[in-house]
Image: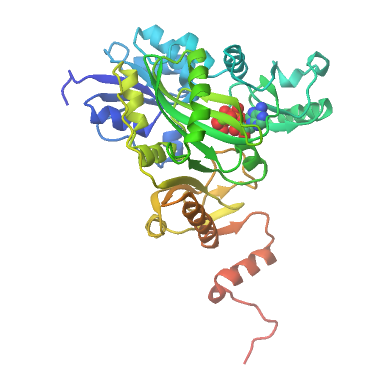
Amino acid sequence: MSEDQPSALLVGTDVYAMRACLRTGIKPYVVHGPHLNDWGSMELPEGAVGIFAEDPTSIESILFSLRRAGATEREFLFVQTSDEEALVTVAALAKVLDLPTPVEADIALHFRDKWLQKQIVSAAGVDVAASQVIEDIQHLDPAGLADFGRAVLKPLAGAGTRNTSVVGSREELVATCQEYRRRGVPQRTFVLEEFITGDEWMVDGVVFDGELQFLSVGSYVEPCLTAVDSNRVLQLERFDPTADAGVYDLARPVVAAALRALGLRRGVFHMELFHQQDTGRLVFGECAARTGGGLIHESVEYKFGVDLGAAAIRCAAGVDPQVEPKVRPDSVSTIFLAGRPGTLIGRPSPAEIRALPGVEHVRLDLPYGFRMADSVADTTEGVGQVMLSGRTREEVRERREFLTQWFDERLTVVPTHADYPELRRWQQANWPDSVSPFGTYPRD
Ligand SMILES: Nc1ncnc2c1ncn2[C@@H]1O[C@H](COP(=O)(O)OP(=O)(O)OP(=O)(O)O)[C@@H](O)[C@H]1O
Ligand SMILES: [Mg+2]
C-alpha cells in the first residue's frame, strides 16, 4: 500500500462502508470502541487501519486516539459514520479537522433529537405524533406536562426500542420514570408521544444533491415496540415496487417531503412510518441518517441490486452514487432467530441453516456459553439473523415460520432459574444416556 493512497476516516465498524472503501481504493482508518475487543466476533478487514477509542461517540476520546495514532495530520478525503450515536460527534469532528462529511452539524441534530425531528417534519406538512419533552425523568413534574392519552415514553435520542414504554396516564408515567430510575436507565431526557396505531413501515434509500435518488419500502411484520413488549424478535419484509406500487405511491411524497425538511443533502437513510390501513393515513415515525440494521443491507441488495454501503461512501466522497436498481421479482424477508432464557450450548450450524429452502444469508452472533436474558430488551436481540427468499410473499412467510420453529426445536439452552431436580429432568430429556441415577441399594 502506498503512502499516497487516498484514505478516509470512518467512525464505527460498518462492514459495508469499510468494504466499499476498500473496493474503491480508499484506505479506511476505522475508529472503533471496545465492543470489537469485548465481543470478539469481528475482525477489521485487511487493508483497514484500526484506531481504538474508549468512546467513539465522544469527540474528546476520538481526538485523543487520532493524536496518539498520529492521524490528525493525515489528509483524509472525508469523515463518515453509520453509527447513529456518533453522528453529531462526527459532524463536530469534521469541523475540528476541517474535513468534508455528508451530514453537517446543524443537519445531524435533526437526525438525532426525536422531538426536534418531529417539529421540523410537521412544519413541512407531514403527519407526526404530538410530542413533548421531559428534560429529566428523574425529576419529573407531571403538572408541567400537556394532557396526553395513550402515549409512548422513549429516550430523546435512543435506538433499538430500548427503554421504551407505553403509558396510559400520569400515574403510569410517574411509575415508569421511577422504574427507569431504579433500573439505572442511563438516559434522562425523554419524549412523550401520542401513540400512533397502524402497521410499521420502513423506508431505506439514498439522497444525493438533496434529491431522493432511490427508495425501498419494507415493513416490520409487527411493530418494533409490540415485538419487544411481547418478548419476540424482529421480522422484516420488503415491498415490490411493481406488485406493491400503491405502497410506493403513498410513501414516496411523504419520504421526499420529510427528507427535504430535515435537510439531508447526501447520504443514506432509514425512515420509519406508521400506516393506518383503514384510512390509508401515513404518519412519520422517525428517520436516521444511516443504513438500517436487521440485514436490511442484504435484503435491499438482494431485491434491488443496490449496495447501500457503497452509496453511503460515494455520497461521503461527494460523488453521485448513480443508483440504478435492478429489481428482482422474488420476495425477501429477514428475521432474527429467537433465543431462550438461559445458557446457549447448542444450535444448528450455519451450513445446516443455509441448506434450508430459500435461505440466502446466515449470520450467527452468539457463542456457546452465552447467557441469554430472561426477556427481549431491544430490537437487536437474537441468536443470529437470516435472510430468506421465495417466489411469493406467502412462500417466504411459510419458510419463515418453518425456519423459526425448526431452529427453536434444535436450540439447546440450559434453562435459567432451574433448580437441580429441574436440571436433572432437563438432562434426562436431552441426554438420557448421560444420566446416572443413584439408588438406595445397589441393584443386582
Ligand atoms: N408515537 C408512537 N406511537 C406508536 N408507537 C411508537 C411511537 N413511537 C415509537 N413507537 C414504537 O417504538 C419503537 C421505537 O421507537 P423509535 O423508532 O422512535 O426509537 P428507536 O429506539 O430509535 O428505534 P429503532 O428500534 O428503530 O432504533 C418504534 O419502532 C415503534 O414500534
Ligand atoms: Mg426506530
Please name whichever residue, 391 or 19, is drawn nearer the observer in this view of the structure: 391
Q: Position of residue 345 (x, y in %)?
A: 51, 57
Q: Quadrant of the rendered structure where residue 25 is?
A: top left
Please name whichever residue, 232 or 244, is drawn nearer the observer in this view of the structure: 244
Picture quarter with the C terminus: bottom right
Query: In the figure, 326 relative to 75: above or below?
Result: below
| Residue at point 51%, 46% (across, down) | 336
Please name whichever residue, 440 or 248, is drawn nearer the observer in this view of the structure: 248
Q: Is residue 163 visible?
A: no
Q: Position of residue 307 (x, y in %)?
A: 34, 33
Q: Position of residue 213 (x, y in %)?
A: 38, 23
* Colour scheme in use: rainbow
Picture quarter with the N terminus: top left
Identity of the residue furthest to the bottom in this view = 444
Query: In the figure, 33 relative to 140: above or below?
Result: below
Please name whichever residue, 366 or 231, is drawn nearer the observer in this view of the structure: 231
8 left or right of 396?
left
Q: Quadrant of the rendered structure where residue 81 is?
A: top left
| Residue at point 51%, 34% (across, down) | 247
| Residue at point 40%, 7% (across, down) | 95
Count up the numbered dots. Answer: 0
| Residue at point 47%, 55% (across, down) | 395
Q: Quadrant of the rendered structure where residue 93 is?
A: top left
The picture quadrant for ligand 1 comes to: top right
Q: Position of residue 212 (x, y in %)?
A: 41, 21
288 left or right of 414?
left
